Image: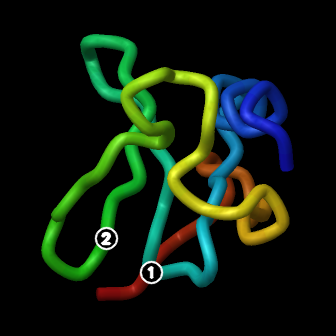
């Protein structure tokens, strides 16, 4: 996925993951796109400091179920 595709999917309410479902892409209240490790809440930016290159390979990102319809069991 491209950077623009990832941002559009997150903004549309889709769950976007990096490598596996343990790493979810989200947008915070400040408008920053982050990759969150779901087990402990650790986060890195979706991009490196230049805001154009992904922190990961584009082919490692994928869309999961819509956030509205995904129910996680803890």
The disc at residue 22 is 1
- Which residue corresponds to the image point at 44% horizontal and 31% vertical from the top-left? 33
Residue furthest to the front in view is: 50
Residue 63: image location, x then y, percent: 78, 59
* Picture quadrant where residue 19 is located: bottom right
Q: Is residue 5 left or right of residue 46?
A: right
Where 33 sits versus 29, above or below?
below
Q: Residue at 55% x, 79% y: name it.
A: 21
Q: CA distance from mark 1 to mark 2?
A: 6 Å
Q: Identify the secondary structure beneath mark 1.
A: strand
Q: Nearer the viewer, residue 58 or 25?
A: 58
The answer to which of marks 1 and 2 sits earlier in the sequence is 1
Report the residue marked by disc 2: 37
In this image, 42 relative to 12: left or right?
left
Kind of element beneath mark 2? strand
- Residue farthest top in this picture: 30
Reply above or below: 41 against 52: below
For mark 2, does the 10 Å Cα neighbourhood hold few (<14), some (14 to 19), or many (20 or more) residues?
A: some
Classify 10 Å Cα crowding around label 1: few (below 14), some (14-19), many (20 and above).
Answer: few
Which residue is located at x 26 percent, y 12 percent? Answer: 30
């Amino acid at each position: 996925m491209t950077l623009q595709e990832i941002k559009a999917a997150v903004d549309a309410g889709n769950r976007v993951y990096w490598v596996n479902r343990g790493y979810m892409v989200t947008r915070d209240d400040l408008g920053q796109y982050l990759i969150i490790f779901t087990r402990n809440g650790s986060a890195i930016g979706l991009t490196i400091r230049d805001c154009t290159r992904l922190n990961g390979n584009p082919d490692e990102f994928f869309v999961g179920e819509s956030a509205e319809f995904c129910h996680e069991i803890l």
